[in-house]
Amino acid sequence: MRRLAFSFMIAALAAGPAAAEQDLLLGADMASPAMTKAEMSRADIEAMIRASDGKPLDLHDKALSGLDLSGLNLRGANLRTARLNGTNLRGADLSGANLEQAWFLKADLSGAKLADARMFGITARDANLSGADLSRSTPIGDFKGANMSGAMLVDLKGGADIRNQSMGLMRAVFTSVNLSGANLKGADLGRSRLEYADLKDADLTDVVLMGSDLSGANLTGATVAGADFKNVDVSGAKLIDLKGEASAKGWAQRVNADRAVTRVSP
């Protein structure tokens, strides 16, 4: 079931704009115990941590949905294909963890440490990542509707790698994500999906946005100095009170620039 679900997600993420609106959860039985239940308890994981002698835990493919794992040290843990839907990971340390193909639907990762985490194929729709540190992570997956307000996304690598097309055009899906006040300095979001994202007062200094979709996004008050806007679709986007606009790259090469909102209506 999980392999089937992931194959559908790959196909949807790799498809064009119309097909990309497909439900990325197609093929997954979200009501199954594998997606909604936990096969371990917090006490079990705490015992594993004590016995690990500082080595990263191996929790790959485990069902951990709904658990309270807040504040735990899961640094470098292998959580590949694990299910953590609705799991409380508030303040947990997942730095350098392998989260590839893992499920975090509606999980609470507020204030969590996710720096350098591997997230290829992750599904984290409607997750709470407010104030989390995702610096240098690779969120190549589905974060639609997530809350990343105030998050640290410095040097994040969420852009499509056009040099490697063996898996299709995989990229970050940040559709309708709350990124207000987030720090994205130096992030790579090339060819990513940011439709209707809230980027109000976000720091986009030197961010690579080339070829991404910002249609309907709110960039009011955002800092865009050095950001690359070449071939970025800004149809309906709010580009109001931007900071550093004069030094933004590819500004004249935005797509649908005439349809962007550049001032507040009287």
Image (tube, grey):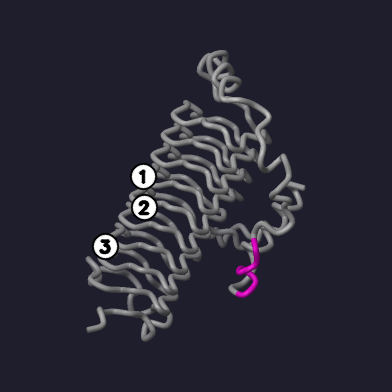
Circle nearer the N terminus (1, 2): 1
Give residue 239's position: percent from left, percent from top. 31, 73
Q: Is mark 1 in CB contact (under 8 Å) with mark 2?
A: yes
Disc 2 crowd, CA 10 A, few/some/many (<14, 14-19, 20+): many
Q: Is mark 3 in CB contact (under 8 Å) with mark 2?
A: no
**Toward which corner of the image does residue 248 lie, by quadrant?**
bottom left
Q: CA distance from mark 1 to mark 2?
A: 6 Å
Give residue 42's position: percent from left, percent from top. 56, 25
Q: CA distance from mark 3 to mark 1?
A: 19 Å
Q: How many marks?
A: 3
Front-most of residues 87 and 205: 87
Q: Nearer the viewer, mark 3 or mark 1?
A: 1
Residue identified by numbered label 2: 149
Front-most of residues 89 and 138: 89
Give residue 216's position: percent from left, percent from top. 42, 73
Q: Tell me, for residue 223, which label it has, or none.
A: 3
**Toward which corner of the image does residue 242 lie, by quadrant?**
bottom left
Q: CA distance from mark 3 to mark 2?
A: 15 Å
Check disc 2 and give the amino acid type: Ser
Check disc 1 and give the amino acid type: Gly
| SS assignment at label 2 | loop
Q: Tell me, for residue 131, which label it has, or none.
A: 1
Magenta stretch: give its range. Answer: 18-23
